[in-house]
Image (cartoon, rainbow, N blue to C red):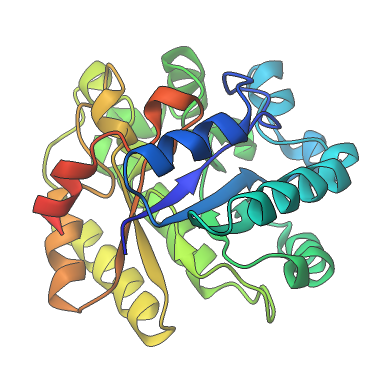
Amino acid sequence: MLTDGHTHTQFCPHGSGQDAELMIQRAIKLGFKKYCITEHAPLPPDFEDDYAGTKEGLTEASMASSDLEKYFQEMTRLQKKYQSEIKITIGFEVDYLPGFEDWTKGFLDEYGPRTQENILSVHFMRGTDQKLWCVDFGVDDFQQGFKSLLERPQDVFTRYFQTVRNSVQADLGTYRPIRIGHMSLVRKYQDYFHLPSQYDEKNLLLIDEILQDVKQQNRQLDLNLAGLYKPFCNDFYPGQSILTRAQKLDIPLIYGSDAHDVLSVGRGYHLAKVLN
């Protein structure tokens, strides 16, 4: 089934503001048979106390809690309106936040029953001053947040994959997300910071541990093509090395455009078919 497994909506503050309905219409025109709406879930109210970095990295990271009901109402309307043309699932891209696991589990316990498909992603990790910093909100923020790690770039990868491992192992309850989002997002600025193209042995062991857990838990990986279109990434997530290891374990890889605008829906899908 031709599926776009990772998309966003007008409720995303760092998106284009274009309506999800227009994105769904494009997916239908492109021949997609399934479309997963996975808007960024709200962040915990207390997260601001543990966050460092630009204000916009916090305020624009996710949809507002006050929009949750409007989100469900509008996406349910679209689900019903287009049900004869495309299967639409409604869910969230949920952030794994170290120290906020109980809050995240509570959120999923409350809203999970109203969803069909969710993604678990790491957009924040511990950095300077032991605060949480964005890994994908600009090179200046990345430099400031992880400057000590950048002295030995493999350490950047290690910190990220340790966080991803913790996300996969976290007890998030009955409604824990089925899919692990863009597992190599830490590479978004790899060309700018000249990060090594290969992982060292320590990181490969971490990656294998993550993938073994994903396999045992019957979860999926996001085969996310958005990185190809980022000016300092120029690669897909999770990259060829992780992709090959996941394929050897027969872990399902679900194409995701990570679209935040209409023209990004389905972008890179032909390459995804070759990779997968």
Q: Position of residue 266 (x, y in %)?
A: 33, 38
Nearest the eye: 99 or 227: 227
Q: Position of residue 189 (x, y in %)?
A: 32, 24
In the rendered image of this protein, does residue 243 appear above or below residue 102? above
In the rendered image of this protein, does residue 233 appear above or below residue 184? above
| Picture residue at 27% right of the left edge, 74% below the top | 251
| Picture residue at 64% right of the left edge, 57% below the top | 91
Q: Position of residue 175 (x, y in %)?
A: 67, 74
Nearest the eye: 162 or 6: 6
Q: Is residue 61 left or right of residue 24?
A: right
| Picture residue at 52% right of the left edge, 74% below the top | 169
Which of the 4 image quadrants contains residue 21?
top right
The answer to whether any part of residue 46 appears in the image is no
Q: Residue furthest bottom?
A: 216
Q: Position of residue 148 (x, y in %)?
A: 41, 29
Quadrant for the C terminus in the image: bottom left
